Image (tube, rainbow, N blue to C red):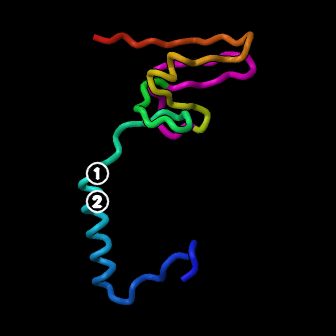
Amino acid sequence: MRPGRIAPPPEDPTAARRGIRRLSEVIDRVGPMRERLCSKVGCAREAVSTLTYDYGDQMAAVGPLGQPGDPHAHDLCAIHTDRLSVPKGWVVVRHETLRV
């Protein structure tokens, strides 16, 4: 079989069941991915805030983690949240949450 091609399903249905069982064992060992990761390339730290932009008002907003899956929002870790810089003339609005 050439690289990049998908293997055909096994003829033996028990082989398919064994593959599913092995996959579920790996998932059980690793566990579900509960944390969201920083959007910065090469960063694997847990995200703590979400960044959104308003290009019309030249504003960037940083706040608590937003809804997952928003294509216009970027999750950031604590380090990248602190290091955030925006173009000259832009305003950064930081929405802080109270920690009790």
Task: Tell me the amino acid under the disc marked 1.
Answer: Val
Amino acid at pointer 2:
Val
Residue 47 locus on image (x, y percent): 43, 30
Q: Reply yes or no: does residue 58 show up in magenta.
A: yes
With respect to residue 8, does 55 lie above or below? above
Q: Which residue is mark 1?
A: 30
Q: Which mark is residue 20?
A: none
> In this figure, which residue is indicated by the disc labeled 2?
26
Q: In the rendering, at what x and y percent does residue 15 appear?
A: 31, 82
Quadrant for the C terminus in the image: top left
Q: Quadrant of residue 13?
A: bottom left
Position of the N terminus by quadrant: bottom right
Left or right relative to 25: residue 41: right
Mark 2: which secondary structure? helix
6 horizontally vs 35: left or right:
right
1 and 2 marks in contact (CB < 8 Å): yes
Q: Which residues are magenta?
A: 50-70
Q: Residue at x 32, y 73 (%)?
A: 19
Q: Position of residue 29 (x, y in %)?
A: 24, 54
10 Å neighbourhood of mark 1: few (<14), some, or many (≥20)? few
